[in-house]
Amino acid sequence: MRLTLRIWRQRGPEEPGAMTEYQVDGIVPEMSFLEMLDQLNEHLILSGEEPVAFDHDCREGICGACGMVINGQAHGPERTTTCQLHMRHFSDGDTIDVEPWRAAAFPVVKDLVVDRSAFDRIIGSGGYVTVPTGSAPEAHATPVPKPVADTAFEHAECIGCGACVAACPNGSAMLFTSAKVVHLNVLPQGAPERESRVLDMVETMDSEGFGGCTNTGECAVACPKGIPLTAISTMNREFLRAQLRGGRKG
């Protein structure tokens, strides 16, 4: 296949950026989207040009580092991570626009790379449980009903890729934050921080500059791991519960 790529190029956070057009040949359907970008970068390097900077790590759909907006859709036309998107979803002669996540809380570092450390700070504010020191407790010492375990596992699948933020017209991080809150709050192990967790994580989310949620639902549609939209309503209930119970203790 021969494709026309229009890619966002930006030298640094303080530099102006613009879409730059490239032609790529010899693309086969079996290639992943990142392999296609690798081929483009090989050509650019051989031509003495600066390669396109983009984030990636596992290339197995696990880490979420590879996020980018492809033809206006977070991660592209399939509900998967960019590294697992294959070129068979495009046709010969297509023009493909490739942009970084667009959100005030995700400043561009270079080209398609954005700073997603705001997510780390949200996690750091409450994404943990109290664990006693000493030997590991017996696995069956704290029974967890299967429906509770299923809910926790479903929300723990969030990989923090940021597609929910990129897809949201408000740049909201509610789906990400709620996935982390629900994952821990439903488990008995998460009970000691149940109130403080949701208050602290929501407060940090707001302070990082993410937009508000208006329930458009685009976040859940774009999520490659299928985090349900109901996570947000569950977190809202947890937030109100925490406020009614007096919030943080100690």
Image: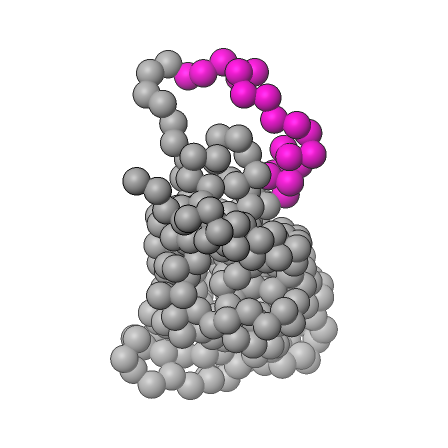
Residue at (51%, 40%) from the top-left corner? 184
Q: Position of residue 146 (x, y in %)?
A: 68, 29
Q: Quadrant of residue 216?
A: bottom right
Q: Position of residue 239 (x, y in %)?
A: 50, 54
Query: Vertically, is 14 above or below 42?
Result: below
Left or right, 32 with respect to 120, comes to right
Q: Judge whether residue 69 can be spotted in this image.
A: no
Q: Judge whether residue 122 can be spotted in this image.
A: yes
Q: Quadrant of residue 23?
A: bottom right
Residue at (32%, 21%) from the top-left corner? 133
Query: Vertically, is 145 above or below 204?
Result: above
- Tell me the magenta residue range: 136-154
Residue at (36%, 23%) from the top-left corner? 132
Q: Inspect the magenta stretch and tell me whether residue 148 lies in it.
A: yes
Quick one: quadrant of the N terminus? bottom right
Q: How many marks?
A: 0
